[in-house]
Amino acid sequence: VTTIEAEAFADCTKLKKVQFGQGLKSIGEQAFYRCKNLEVISSLSNVEWISARAFWCCDKLADIGSLDSLKGIGAGAFASTPWLERQLEENDSMLICNGILIDGKQCTGSVKIPYTVKTIAPGAFSFNTKIESVEIPDSVTTIGSGAFSACYNVKSISMADSVQVIGGGAFEQ
């Protein structure tokens, strides 16, 4: 298996563990949506792309292994999972993987994006009303669609010249 298409396992409520071979490269939109009992998905170390909401509402998903090859991720790929919550707690409210800032929805006040970040994922900070300013360093080249959408209290954004792509609705209010 190299690709899991959109909604391939959606609503498989009895599914608890999934393991694929090392050939898996991409996971489609809502591929595992509402797999309420899914706890473990392994063999993600070669996955390069995870689409939007791929694991959304997987209420028990606590272990996904590594994301060593990740090159891109869609908005809310791990929304509403214990795995994401744990990662945010362990990493000072920001989840960064392979230079991709995946989630910063728990950040507060002035946010300084670390220099290790090259891409701010779609929806990474969306609906975060607790941030007031954002400093984007010259390491960042891409800001994904809706990355800061509905961040109603942001009053200041500092962005380096290195940014080449700003996705649709990235700062939409």
Image (cartoon, helix red, strand yellow):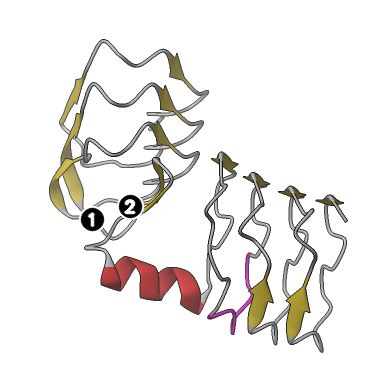
Residue 155: give x, y in percent of width and height: 15, 32
Residue type (three-letter) at the residue carrying disc 1: Cys
Residue 97: give x, y in percent of width and height: 42, 50
| Residue sitting at x 56%, y 70% | 65
Mark 2: which secondary structure?
loop
| Residue sitting at x 37%, y 29% | 171
| Residue sitting at x 37%, y 31% | 118
**Residue 33 placement: quadrant:** bottom right
**Mark 1–mark 2 contact, CB under 8 Å?**
yes
Mark 1: which secondary structure?
loop
Q: Nearer the viewer, residue 33 or 44?
A: 44
Quadrant placement of the C terminus: top left
Q: Is residue 15 magenta?
A: no
Above or below, 93 relative to 103: below
Quadrant placement of the N terminus: bottom right
Give the magenta range.
Answer: 56-62
Relative placement, left or right, of 122 versus 152 is right
Residue type (three-letter) at the residue carrying disc 2: Gly
Relative placement, left or right, of 23 versus 72 is right
Q: Nearer the viewer, residue 3 or 56?
A: 3
Above or below, 40 relative to 100: below
Mark linked to residue 95: none
In this figure, which residue is indicated by the disc labeled 1? 107
Mark linked to residue 104: 2
Q: In the displayed image of the protein, which residue is found farthest to the front?
A: 22
Distance between the Cα atoms at labels 1 and 2? 6 Å
